[in-house]
Image (tube, coloured by chain):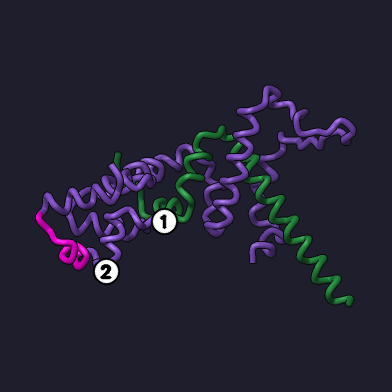
Amino acid sequence: MRLGDRIKQIRDELGLTQGQLANGSSVSQGYLSQLENGEVKNPSAAVLLRVAQAMQVDPDELFEAAGYPTVRMLRQIYQNYESTVDADLLRYLGNLPRDRQRRLLIILRGMEQVLNGSPLVGNGSDWATPDASPPLTVRTSPQASVLKGAASHPELTRARR
Amino acid sequence: MADPPDDRLALAEKIDPELLQMLGRMSRRQQRQVLLLLMIVENLLYEMMRERRAKEDLE
């Protein structure tokens, strides 16, 4: 069910008018009307949360209807993240602005697509042009010790400022 | 499962959930490679910025 239809359905079940629900969720009645009619393309999570609270329903109901990650899903991600994601990487990402995090996500998704679409997974030859120089190799064995000190490397620290 | 401590949640909430989810699917080794890549890119950006400033100062 669409988000707008779901909100209207719950509101009708509760016997609330649009004005009452709008007041309770601190949004204008006009905005709520647009929301119910499917005229708002990307309503903010904060608005959905307020509307859900005003109707005393689980916010996940509205998030699911809007196609957003649900609170349940976010909780699961956030509760498990420490056991699944490298601690240094987490700290590093925590200092990156959201827009850069999204850019990284786009890059990683792009790489995933390349891997899924290519039969030459893993040897890097699909990246090289016929007359290209030999691919650069990165020695990975000392990586852990390099990274251990890298976060406090003076140049990297300066770059972050 | 018990609620995670506040500092853990505070860190997690700074990170895009979709990115966290994607990283969680990667192996630890690949995650370290991502961290290395980010540091190299950051260093490169710093170097480029420094050179640009040096050129501007010369001009």
The amino acid pointed to by label 1 is Ala
Kind of element beneath mark 2: loop
Q: Which mark is residue A15?
A: none
On the question of residue A77 being in view, the answer is yes
Q: Residues within 10 Å of mark 2 (few under 14, many from 20)?
A: some
Q: Position of residue B2 (x, y in %)?
A: 29, 42
Asked whether the beta carbons under mark 2 and mark 1 sit within 8 Å of each other, the answer is no
Q: Position of residue A109 (x, y in %)?
A: 58, 40
Q: What residue is rendered at 48% in x and 52% in y? A: B15
Which chain does the purple colour mark?
A
In which image quadrant can residue A27 be found? bottom left
- Seen in the image, is A79 located left or right of residue A144? left
Q: Are marks 2 and 1 on the same chain?
A: no
Q: Which residue is mark 2?
A: A28
Colour for chain B in the figure: green
Q: How many marks?
A: 2
Q: What residue is rendered at 26% in x and 61% in y? A: A33
Q: Which residue is mark 1?
A: B10
Give the magenta part as a residue range: A15-24
What chain does badge 2 belong to?
A
The amino acid pointed to by label 2 is Ser
Instruction: Indicate yes or no whether the magenta region holds residue A18.
Output: yes
In which image quadrant can residue A31 be found? bottom left
Callout in the foreground (2, 1):
2
